[in-house]
Image: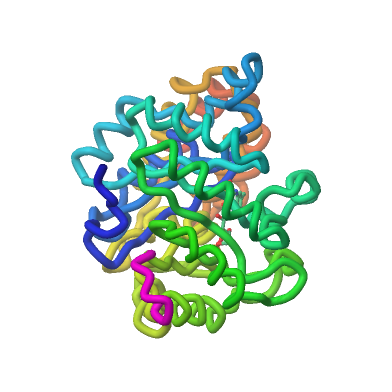
Amino acid sequence: MDNFWQTIKKPIIALAPMEDVTDTVFREVVLSVSEVDALNVVFTEFTSTDGLCHEKGRAKVIERLLVNASEMELLKSRGTKLVAQIWGSDPEKFRLSASLISEMQIFDGIDINMGCPVKKVVKNRSCANLINFPEQAKEIIYATAESTPLPVSVKTRIGFSRINTEEWIGHLLETAPKAITVHGRTRKMMSNGPALWDEIGKAVIVRNQTGSSAVIIGNGDVCSYTEALERIQQFDVDGVMVGTGVFKNPWMFNKYPVEIDIAQRISLMRKHITLYRNTWGNGKDYNVLKRFFKIYLNGFNGAAHWRDRFMRANGFDEALALLDEFENNAAI
Ligand SMILES: Cc1cc2nc3c(=O)[nH]c(=O)nc-3n(C[C@H](O)[C@H](O)[C@H](O)COP(=O)(O)O)c2cc1C
């Protein structure tokens, strides 16, 4: 199986895994306005290995790994890679989940979440808490890699309560992961304060010293393609992963900044709502969709007024009717 992390055209620019954000719908929306070389890897939301291994729970959890045919077509035509991210604490469940995911034959890689800081996952010795249990983390990586031909990567932080970059990345490298994404914050920092890119740079130095061929991706606070290139140059990472930057500008994955007019914003918003309705119907909380509206409804006169009206719209039909009204009223 192709280790795409090695063969993919560099630099690697990835859209981060984000729960309730990077489902098949949002990935397709973003891909549709991104240049091929300015976004070449996308990730699913993190998906529980406990859930995947639970006979009854599986049906719900596996929705996170849903890939629409239209997204798949786009991925294939662009050559963009899709990575399934999983989390948990039991190596055997990683083993089973990895083989299940491989059998689906839709993913190009499997990523292990060793970075999520929230209490309910950390208390179970999973995600960021694996930084405190390196032997268990290694067992998990080995079990995953043994049961899939797909390249296995890890996404993590620079420490748990304190910065511990070199030691922790050194542990991970022993297992020969194909890539490591380093979010430049400790678990204690949560999402606060600036990401510490010097620490991400240290991860690259450790990788170089050990002679490992693992790709290192830096993550934290990148909001434009130009910024991504600057980080790559300054810290010698193989690529950059972007999370919340995409909320400020879904068009950010283009080599040159693009001027977006109202018509383009509204057209992308319509695409998002329609795809979301066709994909999830009432099977997913409509309020999850609402959170995206502010991405589109800004940067023009009267945006606050329209945001307010859209936030009060109740359901797909009302939101789409409001879009019609907006287009009929606004000089776009
Ligand atoms: C709403 C939200 C959901 C997230 N869900 C995940 C997730 O499922 N898996 C993961 O590894 N990181 C998750 N993250 C963390 C991001 O992938 C990323 O590491 C973090 O936002 C820092 O990058 P940024 O500064 O570019 O946003 C999430 C972040 C946000 C804001």
Q: Do we see residue 163 in this rendering? A: yes
Determine the residue positioned at 72% across, 66% down.
160
Ligand 1 lies in quarter: bottom right
Q: Do we see residue 329 in this rendering? A: no
Quadrant location, the N terminus: top left
Compare residues 249 and 208 and report the one nearer the observer: 208
Image side of residue 255 versus residue 249, left or right? left
Considering only vertical position in the picture, is 196 above or below 269? below
Compare residues 222 and 257 and report the one nearer the observer: 222
- In magenta segment, residue 211: yes
- In magenta segment, residue 306: no
Determine the residue positioned at 30% across, 32% down.
72
Residue 101, percent from left and from top:
44, 31
Q: Which residues are magenta?
A: 208-214
Image side of residue 192 versus residue 210, left or right? right
Name the colour scheme: rainbow
Determine the residue positioned at 45% across, 82% down.
205
Residue 46, percent from left and from top:
57, 42
Residue 96, percent from left and from top:
52, 30
Compare residues 2 and 27 and report the one nearer the observer: 2
Q: In the orientation shown, which residue stands out farthest toward the top?
A: 56
Determine the residue positioned at 50% across, 48% down.
142
Residue 294, percent from left and from top:
57, 48
Considering only vertical position in the picture, is 322 above or below 216? above
